[in-house]
Amino acid sequence: MKYVLVTGGVVSGLGKGVTASSIGVVLKACGLRVTSIKIDPYLNTDAGTMSPFEHGEVFVLDDGGEVDLDLGNYERFLDIKLTRDNNITTGKIYQSVIEKERRGDYLGKTVQVVPHITDAIQEWIERVALIPVDGKEGPADVCVIELGGTIGDIESMPFIEALGQFSYRVGPGNFCLVHVSLVPVLKAVGEQKTKPTQHSVRGLRGLGLTPNILACRSDMPLDVNVKEKLSQFCHVPVANIITLHDVTNIWHIPLLLREQKAHEALLKLLNLQGCAKEPMLEEWMSRAKLCDTLHDPVRIAMVGKYTGFSDSYLSVLKALLHASVACRKKLVVDWVPSSDLEETTAKEAPESYKAAWKLLKGANGILVPGGFGDRGVKGKILAAKYARENKVPYLGICLGMQIAVIEFARSVMNLREANSIEFDPDTTTSAVIFMPEGSKTHMGGTMRVGVRRTYFVSGDSKSAKLYGNVRFVDERHRHRYEVNPSMVPEFERAGLAFVGKDETGKRMEIIELPSHPYFVGVQFHPEFKSRPGKPSAVFLGLIAASCGQLDAWLQASGQQNNLTTHASSNVFVTPKKIYRNGSLKKPSKSLLTNGKLHANGTGVHA
C-alpha cells in the first residue's frame, strides 16, 4: 500500500479537500485504485451533531456514517463509496483507546498519548486503507490521507506525531507528503509572497514531517523565480512545486495537476513508475470545458435557513450543477432565506421581504433542502405553496418533502392545524410524526441514517421514469420524522400521490402531484449519490422541468429497448434525443457515462 498525505499551511480554507480529491483523480486516471481517509482533529466522534453554520454540511455515507463534507468531495471525484471509518476524529481515537483501557487490553500500562494514541491512529489508517471502496475485490493501490486543520494546531499534534512515525515505519517509496500552502499577492505591488509557505514548511519540518511536493494556492500561476525561491528555502525540487491558481470551476484542478506533471512526481516518489500509465482525463477535460461554455441560465431558488453559508448545502449545489450541465444549462442559484418570506419579516424588514419574494418569483424552479428546527418553516411552507399554485417546478428534500405535505394538508385539505410534531408537539393534526425507533434524549447517531430501499408503487410516476423504470432504488437517508402513515389515505383521496414507499409500505419516501409539471418530494437525500456525469434522477427532473426539457428526458427514460438493467447494479438509460438550447439534439457522450444517462438508482427493471 502506498500513502499520500495532504496537509495545510498556516491559513485554513485553502482547498485541501479538493486538492486531495484531485490527486486521487489523477492517480486513478493513471490506472491505479485509490481510496481516501479524512482526519478531523476535533473531539466530536462524528459530524452528526455539528451545526452547518460552523462546519458545513453533514455528509452521509451508505453505512450511515455522518462525516465531514470533504468525504463527499472524495466520493464525487473518485466515484467511490466510503465507510464511516474513512473519517477519523480525535473523539473516535480516544474512545477506542479508552475502551481498550477499560477492558484491560494494556495490561496495567500507563496509557499515554505516545505510544498508545499514536499507535491507535496508525493502526486505524492501515486497517481502513485495506477496505475496498470501488466495488472491486482487494485493497486499493494508493490511500490519499487529508489532515484537517492547519499546521501548528494544538489538537492536531497527536496526529502529526503519529504520521511522522508512520512515514518512517512504511519507509521511503511508500509515503509522500503534499503540503498545500498560500502564496498571496500584494495588490499594491503585484508581488507573489513566499513567506507564508516558508513558515508553514519550517513548522512542518520542526514537527518531524518533510514535504515532498508543494501545492501552492495563488490567484495566478507562480512565476519561475518564485518557484526557485520556494525550492531554495523549502528544500523541494522546482519540478515538485505545483501551482493551484484560481480556476473557473474545480473540475479544472485535476487538469492543472496533470499539466504540471504532478503525477510524474507522485509516481516517482511512490515507486509506481513501472505499473502506471499516462493519465487519461479526456472525459474530465470535456466536462470542465463544457461547464465554462454554458451561458443559457436556469435559475433555482434555494429556500433554506443556512443560506448565509453555501457549504451548508454543498452536496445539493453539486447535484444541481451535475444536472444543469447534463441539460446544457448554466446554473444560477438564488439564495432565499426562508424566514424572509414570512409576514413577520414584511413588518420588521420590508426590504428583505420584497427581495426574497422577488427572487422566488423570478426563479425557474424551487428547491427546499433538508434541515432541522422550526426557524424559517413558515417561509418554506409559503415557498411550497407558491410552487404548487403557480405550477413552478419544485423539489423538496427530507424536510422539504414534509413541508410540502403540511402545506397540502392546510391549503388543499383545509386542515388548518396540520403540522409536524417537530414544530408543534401538541398539534391536533399531526401530518408528520416522530419515528418510533428514534431517541428523544440523545441527538448523535439516533436518526434513520444511511442507505435504505425505496420501492416504486407504479412505473407511471415521473420519479420512476427518471430513475429508469426500476422496481426500487437505494438512497441515503438522515431523518427522525416521517409522514404520518395513518393520514396517507386522506392525502391520496385529495390528490397527493405517494409513489415511493419503504419495504413495509408504511413509510412514505416519494411524493408527487400528478397534475403538476414537476412537484416532487423525497424523504431521502439524493444529493449524496450524485456524481459528475451521473446526475441524481430527481435533481435532473427539477432542472429539466425548469428549462422545458422534462418531457424529452421522460420520453428517453421510458424507452424500454434502451435500458440496460441488472439486479443490484446501476441502471443506465440512453436517450436517443434530448433538448439542447431549445432544439432536439443527441447528447454529448462527454457528459454521460459511456454515452449513457445514469439513473443513479440501484434496482431492477419493473
Image (cartoon, grey):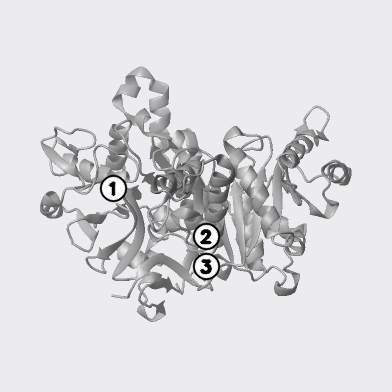
Which amino acid lies under the numbered mark 1 shown in the image of this protein? Met
Q: Which mark is residue 401?
A: 1
Q: Would residue 285 be visible to someone looking at this image? A: no
Depicted 5 relative to depicted 151: above or below? below
Q: Mark 2, mark 1: which one is toward the viewer?
A: 2
Whole-angstrom CA distance, mark 3 to mark 2, is 35 Å
- Indicate the quadrant containing the N terminus: top left, top right, bottom left or bottom right: bottom right
Q: Which badge, 3 or 2, comes first in the chain's sequence?
A: 2
Q: Would residue 208 be visible to someone looking at this image? A: yes
Which amino acid lies under the numbered mark 2 shown in the image of this protein? Arg
Whole-angstrom CA distance, mark 3 to mark 1, is 29 Å
Which amino acid lies under the numbered mark 3 shown in the image of this protein? Leu
Q: Which mark is residue 127?
A: 2
Q: In the displayed structure, does residue 441 sit left or right of residue 290? A: left
SS state under label 1:
helix
Q: In the displayed structure, does residue 56 sit left or right of residue 170? A: left
Camera-nearest residue between 516 and 259: 259
